[in-house]
Image (spheres, grey):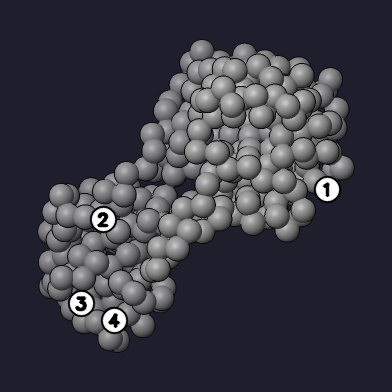
């Protein structure tokens, strides 16, 4: 097929590779424009752009697809299909109408559950036991199109980084299979029941409230690892928790119960396993405590909600 690929983050790279390896003619790769990143705030190309350039594929990075000029440029590619994976820009109906066959999307959830921007994080936060990938025909609604393929995987104790990487590989394989034999994947309407929306993550959601149950805080830690990282504040410094375990223990929420950083929650307690101080690398709890005392009896309190996150 003549394919236009549209994607931006690491999640989309395996699908681009799968299409390239399958021998499809990728006539253009669309990705979001370079953004300022890092301490120097220099413009950084998206992971998809970096990979596309390494493969020798033409890259386009318009800020929007709403203009007639951009739509004409897309139409001039004469694609059989557009394949989308976490592109991050809305596709106007005029774009959706251009491919001869379909615009297909790799969506990281079991639709209709978790339509929207952050399906992996929302599944973890909600305590879902399973998630997966849906290959979906795109339409004007928010992830409402017909489904061509669905596969499931356990959420288990995975954090968002590990689960996203797993779903990216799964979605790449599924998309390659659908394109290899489209007749084996007739579109099916999404169920009317079970609709849930995965709103974009607000960094303020990563602030830990130790008054919540320990099981919910452990999910919060996994949902926001590796970024933005669930955090609390101590001695004027923000500490991110990148991995944690639910443990036995009780006390006033936010109270450190021992010298190994067992922290009382609204119900139960949580023991951080991997943490990160500002400007430092990720480290085990024991290593952090050797250079940054958080002794038993300390009461940990989060920063005010209005404080800048970042």
* Whether residue 199 is visible: yes
Locate the N terminus and report the quarter of the image it occupies: top right
Mark carried by residue 294: 3
Measured as percent of width and height from the top left, residue 141 is found at: 50, 18
For discs 2 and 3, the disc positioned in front in the rendered view: 2
| Circles 3 and 1 in contact, beta carbons < 8 Å | no
The residue that mark 2 highlights is 309
- In this picture, residue 58 sits left or right of residue 286: right
Disc 2 or 4, which lies upstream in sequence? 4
- In this picture, residue 188 sits left or right of residue 3: left
The kind of secondary structure element at disc 4 is: helix
- In this picture, residue 234 sits left or right of residue 284: left
* Whether residue 128 is visible: no
| Circles 2 and 3 in contact, beta carbons < 8 Å | no
The answer to which quarter of the image holds residue 37 is bottom left
Measured as percent of width and height from the top left, residue 36 is found at: 43, 57
Q: Residues within 10 Å of mark 2 (few under 14, many from 20)?
A: some
The residue that mark 1 highlights is 21
The residue that mark 4 highlights is 289
Q: Residues within 10 Å of mark 3 (few under 14, many from 20)?
A: some
| Circles 2 and 4 in contact, beta carbons < 8 Å | no
Foreground residue, 260 or 202? 202
| Circles 1 and 4 in contact, beta carbons < 8 Å | no
The kind of secondary structure element at disc 1 is: helix
Disc 3 or 4, which lies upstream in sequence? 4
Disc 3 or 1, which lies upstream in sequence? 1
**Mark 3 and mark 4: span between their CA atoms?**
7 Å
Disc 1 or 4, which lies upstream in sequence? 1
């Amino acid at each position: 097929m003549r394919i236009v690929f549209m994607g931006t983050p690491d999640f989309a790279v395996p699908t681009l590779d799968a299409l390239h390896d399958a021998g499809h003619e990728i006539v253009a790769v669309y990705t979001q424009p370079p953004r300022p990143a890092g301490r120097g705030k220099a413009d950084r190309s998206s992971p998809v752009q970096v990979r596309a350039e390494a493969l020798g594929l033409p890259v386009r990075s318009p800020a929007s697809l709403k203009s007639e000029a951009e739509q004409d440029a897309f139409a001039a590619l004469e694609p059989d299909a557009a394949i989308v994976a976490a592109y991050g820009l809305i596709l106007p109906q005029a774009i959706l109408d251009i491919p001869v066959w379909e615009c297909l999307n790799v969506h990281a959830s079991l639709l209709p559950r978790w339509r929207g921007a952050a399906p992996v994080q929302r599944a973890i936060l909600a305590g879902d036991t399973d998630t997966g990938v849906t290959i979906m025909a795109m339409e004007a609604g928010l992830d409402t199109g017909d489904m061509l393929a669905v596969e499931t995987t356990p959420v288990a104790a995975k954090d968002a980084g590990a689960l996203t990487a797993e779903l990216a590989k799964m979605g790449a394989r599924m998309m390659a299979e659908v394109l290899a034999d489209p007749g084996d994947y007739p579109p099916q309407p999404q169920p009317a029941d079970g609709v849930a929306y995965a709103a974009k993550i607000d960094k303020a959601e990563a602030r830990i409230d130790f008054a919540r149950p320990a099981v919910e805080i452990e999910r919060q830690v996994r949902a926001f690892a590796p970024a933005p990282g669930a955090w609390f504040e101590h001695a004027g410094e923000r500490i991110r928790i990148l991995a944690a375990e639910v443990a036995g223990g009780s006390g006033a929420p936010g109270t450190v119960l021992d010298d190994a950083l067992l922290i009382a929650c609204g119900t139960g307690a949580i023991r951080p396993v991997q943490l990160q101080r500002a400007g430092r690398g990720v480290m085990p709890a024991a290593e952090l405590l050797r250079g940054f005392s958080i002794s038993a009896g300390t009461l940990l309190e989060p920063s005010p909600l209005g404080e800048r996150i970042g």
